[in-house]
Image (cartoon, helix red, strand yellow):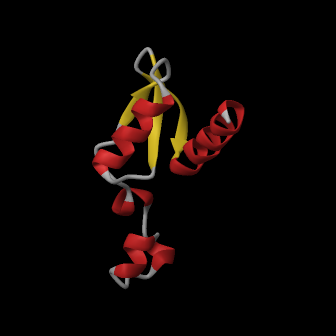
Amino acid sequence: MVRAVAEEENVSGVSVAQVMSSPILTVEKKLSPHYARDLMADKRIRHLAVTEEGKIVGIISARDLLAYFKTVSKEVG
């Protein structure tokens, strides 16, 4: 939506295809949260599709990772 608003389009007539990012970046479910964090940082994105055996099974966000790392740091400290 930010992209549609920034381009001053009438958002009521905008389709998802017009504003989505492509290609979709993914991370395998079995990989570590550290890997997902690093990939998001490298690509400057806030969301990744999570895959298992090539199928999308979820989405992880930067906010999800922040909550995870906050919890882990409390357990260590």
In the rendered image, the vertical position of residue 11 relative to residue 67, given as above or below: below
- At 35% across and 48% down in the image, what residue appears? 41
- At 49% across and 17% down in the image, what residue appears? 30
| Viewer-nearest residue: 9 or 75 | 75
Viewed as shown, does residue 54 lie left or right of 33? left
In the rendered image, the vertical position of residue 54 relative to residue 17, given as above or below: above
- At 45% across and 21% down in the image, what residue appears? 31
Residue 9 in sight? yes
Q: Quadrant of residue 15?
A: bottom left
Q: Position of residue 13 (x, y in %)?
A: 45, 74
Q: Position of residue 58 (x, y in %)?
A: 56, 33
Q: Position of residue 1 (x, y in %)?
A: 46, 69
Q: Position of residue 68 (x, y in %)?
A: 62, 38
| Viewer-nearest residue: 15 or 1 | 1
| Farthest bottom residue in view | 8
Residue 22 in sight? no
Viewed as shown, does residue 69 lie left or right of 13? right
